[in-house]
Amino acid sequence: MEDNWQLKTGCESLRKKFVDLHTGQPSDSERCDSVELDDKIRILIRKNDTPESCKKPENSSYALSAFEKSKNQNCSGQRQAAMESKKTSECIFTKKLTDISLGQKIISLEKQKQELLSVNNQWDQHFRQMKQHYEKKVTEMEAKLETVQKIVRDLERERYQTQQECQRLEDLMRNQLAQEMKDKYTLRKENRFLKQETALTNTKKMYYECEIKRLNQSLLDALKHQSTCSQSSHVEALDSNRKQEEMGTQMELLQEQ
């Protein structure tokens, strides 16, 4: 009787546990108590599995089936509760991990943002410096280019003036050369004429020299004849004087030429 009472008490306890499982989530201590209670119920069932229980097979079978049914329901509820608790814990843990991961990502992104802003500021400063540097270089190069272009324009103007001067000098030299050639031709012509005149003069000179020699010889002959013939007539003397005067006049003319 005491064993039946304990079995009945265990069944009532299992029924209450089953109701508690459906109404709320049991604690870990309650789960442990239910496990210990299940073990006690199994022991009581074995004890009740005696000849007395065999005398009342219907009561023991009914109690055993009710116990097994209650036990299965209890175990199913416990497993379901454990799974739900595990899922809840996993969800909470996953959420915490997600929050921690998101926080770390946010911190990392903020750090990357600060680094990018710092690098961007550095590049901006570097770009401004390089822009100012190259703008200064461009200004200097434009000034140098303007100076060089001015020098080139001056050189072009000087080259044009020099070319014009060279052209003028070339024309002048050409004209001078043509004039010199013309003068040279004229001089050659005059030289040829003078040579001809000189040759003619030399011929006349030779003729007059021969004539002078002949006259001188005639004069000498006449003087000799006059000295030998002192009694020549006065007419012959006058003729001789006239001839001498003519010869002297011709000699003067020849000397002047």
Image (tube, helix red, strand yellow):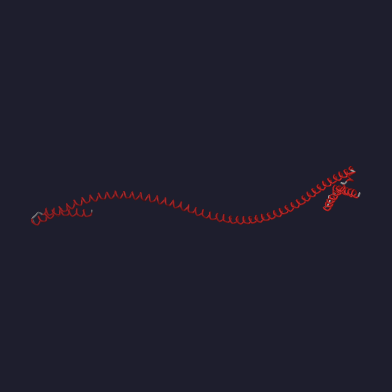
* Residue 72 in picture, x, y percent from top left: 83, 45
* Residue 190 in picture, x, y percent from top left: 29, 49
Tag count in the figure? 0
66 or 112: nearer the viewer: 66
105 or 154: nearer the viewer: 105
228 or 27: nearer the viewer: 27
Q: In the picture provided, is 40 more to the left or to the right than 223?
A: right
Of all residues shown, which one is farthest toward the right?
Answer: 1
Of all residues shown, which one is farthest toward the front?
Answer: 51
* Residue 208 in picture, x, y percent from top left: 19, 52
Q: In the picture provided, is 215 more to the left or to the right than 75?
A: left
90 or 104: nearer the viewer: 90
* Residue 229 in picture, x, y percent from top left: 8, 55
